[in-house]
Image: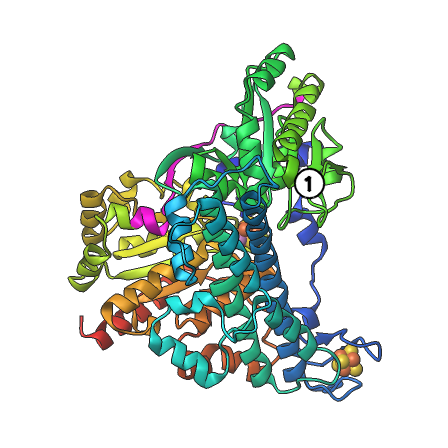
Amino acid sequence: MKDTRSIDPASLQMLKVARDEGLETAWDRYLAQQPQCGFGELGLCCRNCNMGPCRIDPFGDGPQKGVCGATGDIIVARNLLRMIAAGAAAHSDHGRDIVETLRGVAAGEIRDYTIKDESKLMALAREFGLSTEGETVQVIAKKLAEAALEEFGTRKGYLQGINRVPVKRKEIWEKLGITPRGIDREVVEAMHRTHFGVDNDPANLILHGLRCSLSDGWGGSLLATEFSDVLFGTPRPVRGRSNLGVLSKDAVNILVHGHEPVLSEMLVAAAKDLALISAARAKGASGINLVGMCCTGNEILMRHGVPVAGNFLQQELAIITGALEAVVVDVQCIMPALGQLAACYHTKFISTSPKAKFPGALHIPLDEHNALETARKIILQAIENYPNRDQNRVYIPEETAEYVAGFSVEALLNALGGTLDPLIEAVKNKKIRGIAALVGCNNPKVTQDHSHVNLAKALIARDVLVVETGCAAIASAKAGLLLPEAAELAGAGLAEVCRALGLPPVLHMGSCVDISRILTVAAALARELGVDIADLPVAGAAPEWMSEKAVSIGAYVVASGIFTVLGTVPPVLGSNVVADLLTRQAKDLVGGYFAVETDPFKAAELVIAHIDDKRAAMGI
Ligand code: XCC
Ligand code: SF4
């Protein structure tokens, strides 16, 4: 029987190995959870106070109200708002850590990082309205970092980032009262409103959810992206390799997994240290092979072309190759299962963030003030572990595919010759039908990568330029869609544009916080054309999403005016009111709205129909 857990041959091979070795993975635990709680699936359970837990009977025979009187509509809306708040908090706290690092570097307290992109620093300083004349880079960086830290609790009433959007969009947010005011504030207010006995109006709750998510997209995530570029360099097109085949049979393999480039950048630097490479050779290894996974993988593949071993559902499979000396993690998307699994092999599971500890992990805290030293210490742990590798238990799948990544806004502009005009021209003359942003995770509820890859292929075949981030982009890397050569899979118009500019038909724009890059391009296109973002022939999709961060992303993309298709069902179907708000009324309120479509081929039709509607409305 065909194994439908993944379309990735590397994953499928590793799942066989897992079965032979008697090891469990997320797929097994997903099966063990069947049937999953129907109340939870519909969003109809509430634990917000200790009179509960309460649940609403979706069939109407049982209770229709919680102990407090909350209806299903209220409970579903509150739960959704809490998901958005958690996702926004995760992105934004990541952003804060990056800004704090820049502040430390500027103040001379953190010495192992430097400012890699001064021109971006200057551009941001101007954007923040800071005077740069006659000031040193250090001083400007310090002022900018302090101004950015202000954004988390600002009292000026709006976030700096929203000045990037067209006036029309700002007016829509103003009218609805959803202009994001401060990054932390919106998350705190979300928690306040969902506390017992506060906001009990589904629409009012959802509107705040949009505001909270906007503080992520145009606030926390945007700062994470921009300040990472300042510190670590703005990505430029770079070639690399992807999938589990990037693991080496004879080098010390170190997998870095998580999200914040503060750690991974230092590991990249330390892995090139000649003393460490000789130490690895002294242990009989051919060298040090640092590879990435998930978004921290994306950060270093965007900036350094570091090989990426896979996306979210491959984190356990990487350990099962038996070839990992260390898995080094920071925050987000790290399965708590890794410790127990690593213990079945020689693999060391090393946690580094004081915010994220795991059972079975060796904790080596990353101290920004001594980052290089910490990175060296971590790599040494891996090197010392190399002789413990049991070569008889090593199984590395052959699969790898090349990718070209690194499409920051700056890189994209550069490829276009300095302005957006060639892109606008191509859209106007229909060589490019529209643009679709494909983002998000893997989820064992659906075949790994199947929706990502098939949706991307279906769209480029119909001349839709695809831009991607996160685990979606890694899926495309593994499928070879991130190469200029993939233009042959594109429709004639898109293929012509790709060939003329040397671009792949699917552009990797970075990690999930880098969806802010996509927002920035969309806003710039709208401004250039004198329209609102909602008027553009642009759509979003999260075909295999699973995390709360993805819920925040979906919300800010929709609130920014962009129609978005979800490929796994969000826990809102217990409320017709909420479902109707998200999939219908949102269109009138903010221009963007959600659709849920689990079939990627049908999702492609939805995206194309939307793009064609927008083209018709624009008269192009
Ligand atoms: Fe995580 Fe960002 Fe999802 Fe991948 S895509 S599973 S959130 S790593 Ni963001
Ligand atoms: Fe039940 Fe209301 Fe308490 Fe929720 S807030 S657990 S619905 S009593």
Q: Amino acid at mark 1?
A: Thr
Magenta residues? Answer: 393-412
Nearer to us in this view, 436 or 147: 147
**Image point (40%, 76%), residue name:** 170
Quadrant in which residue 49 is drawn? bottom right
Position of residue 184 measured from the top left corner of the image (x, y, whole percent):
61, 67
Compared to residue 199, the image places residue 331 above or below, namely above
Nearer to us in this view, 439 or 221: 221
Q: Could you tell me if residue 105 is visible in this image? A: yes
**Image point (32%, 74%), residue name:** 532
Compared to residue 206, the image places residue 482 above or below, namely above
Quadrant in which residue 578 is drawn? bottom right
Position of residue 433 measured from the top left corner of the image (x, y, whole percent):
24, 61
Q: Is residue 400 magenta?
A: yes
Report the residue marked by disc 1: 352
**Image point (65%, 13%), residue name:** 283
Residue farthest toward the front in the current orientation of the protein: 134
Badge 1, how many Cα within 10 Å: few under 14, some, many 20+? many
